[in-house]
Image (cartoon, rainbow, N blue to C red):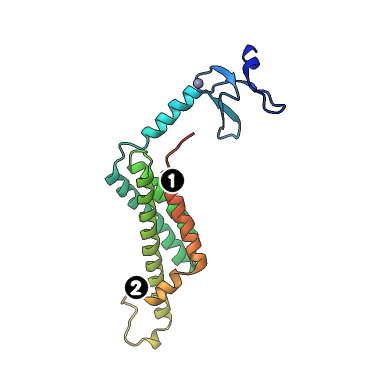
Amino acid sequence: MEKLDHTISIGSEVGKTVSCSNCGREGTTEEFITLRDHKGKDVYLCPECKEETNQKFLAETTGQNIILAGVGGIIGAVIGSLIWYFITTNTGQEIGYISLGLGYLVGFGVYLGSGKKRGLNLQILSAFIAILAIFITEKFIFDYFVNSYITQHLTDYPMLSTHRYVFVSFLDPDFLQQFISPIGLLIYAIGIYIAFKFCKPRKI
Ligand SMILES: [Zn+2]
């Protein structure tokens, strides 16, 4: 209780005596920082443990394995893209919000591949892989719908047969026009942001 005498009271609030959740040392809420744990409960850290934690967080941004981060991100992208492609082509509807899950898988893949590291370079790598994956997946989904249209209207396309799968160009104006829709772009942006955020360095 002695320590309470030395705390500065702000308004009517007097620093509460708490113990550091890391080392158990006692102090007041004014000298300790207050954090929220995953259950939404307040926990406290003394300045020394805060510094130590930030040092650990800083260490997460060094010694990244960039090559494996790229491989991990691509694996995440392929898994996410395949799920997206099969759900969309099986339901017959364009379900762009699956790109949010793809963004998560890319970020997670980069994180694991890098050796559970973080940093702006990994964030940029994740975003880049997510953008490519979204663009490529949408093109193959577009191909699928073009081909199913042709199959249904075969008499209108005497030059084509059901045995020939048509691939449109990535620069096909019809594809690009469909790709660049305001709602589509908003959803892609969120998916890319999810990928970008995954390896964000931590700090308290
Ligand atoms: Zn402590």
Residue 181 placement (x, y as % from top left):
48, 69
Q: Nearer the viewer, residue 101 or 203?
A: 203
Q: Give the image location of residue 118, x and y in percent.
A: 38, 40
User: To which residue does mark 2 refer?
Assistant: 171
Q: Position of residue 72 (x, y in %)?
A: 33, 47
Check if mark 1's residue and mark 2's residue have beta carbons within 8 Å: no
Q: CA distance from mark 1 to mark 2?
A: 30 Å
Q: Is residue 178 left or right of residue 113?
A: right
Residue at figure coordinates x 38%, y 42% from the top left: 119
Q: Closest to the observer: 64 or 34?
A: 34
Name the residue type under label 2: Leu
Q: Quadrant of the N terminus?
A: top right
Q: Which mark is residue 198?
A: 1
Kind of residue at disc 1: Phe
Q: Residue at x 65, y 15 (%)?
A: 5
In the foreground, 82 or 132? 132
